[in-house]
Amino acid sequence: MFGKKPPSEPSKSKQPSQSQSLSNVTLTGGMVQLGQAGGNLQQSQTGNLNVQQQGITGAEVVTLLEQLEATVKQSALNPAQQEELLDYLRPAKREAGKETPSKELVGQNLKQVSETMQTLKDTTEAGKSLWQTGTDIFRAVAPWLGVAAAFFGV
């Protein structure tokens, strides 16, 4: 009457499989690690580590801006369009080269460069290829400035 009940059998059902995934994610200056507590945890991590993870120096920013300046000068844009871009690019490059640069000033000038380049991208064939070069440079410089690449519209 008050005897022991036989122990119930452990559940034979399978545990549900669980998965976490990130794709098409751009992460600058950090790493993401996902995991789930429990048995049989398997974890893999892939991705490209670029110079952005290590951070870049002011001298490297100047080099990148010099590359952008050379690309603008070699582009098929008319001289007035080139000069408009260079009017903002040169002060940004000059400021980035200082011992203690004002990153805010560099960012403001580069934002003007990116806005002008976006307009040229939409209105000229030469602006399209120039925009591609510009976006690569803006993405590389953004962490140094402490802003997201979206600040430049990329």
Image: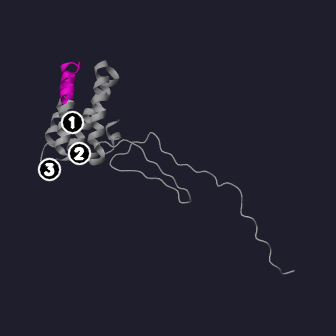
- How packed mark 2 is, by other alpha carbons closer than 10 Å (few <14, some 14-19, many 20 or more), is some
Name the side, left or right, on which 123 lies relative to 6. Answer: left
- Asked if the residue at tag 2 contacts the one at tag 1, i.e. Cβ–Cβ closer than 8 Å, the answer is yes
Q: Where the N terminus falls, by quadrant?
A: bottom right
Q: Does 75 appear in magenta?
A: yes
Residue 4's quadrant in the figure?
bottom right
Kindly identify which residue carries mark 3: 100
Q: Does 91 appear in magenta?
A: no
Residue 113's quadrant in the figure?
top left
The residue positioned 56% from the left and 59% from the top of the image is: 39
Name the side, left or right, on which 147 lies relative to 46. Answer: left
Dot 3 falls on a residue whose secondary structure is loop
What percent of the width, then of the height, locates residue 154? Answer: 35, 35
The residue positioned 17% from the left and 25% from the top of the image is: 83
Cα distance between the residues tagged 3 and 1: 18 Å
Kindly identify which residue carries mark 1: 64
Name which of mark 3 and mark 1 comes first in the sequence: 1
What percent of the width, then of the height, locates residue 101? Answer: 16, 47
**Which amino acid type corresponds to the residue marked 2 in the rendered image?**
Ile
**Which amino acid type corresponds to the residue marked 1 in the rendered image?**
Leu
- Asked if the residue at tag 1 contacts the one at tag 3, i.e. Cβ–Cβ closer than 8 Å, the answer is no
Does residue 53 lie above or below 38 as drawn? Answer: above
Name the side, left or right, on which 100 lies relative to 45. Answer: left
Does residue 123 lie above or below 138 as drawn? Answer: above
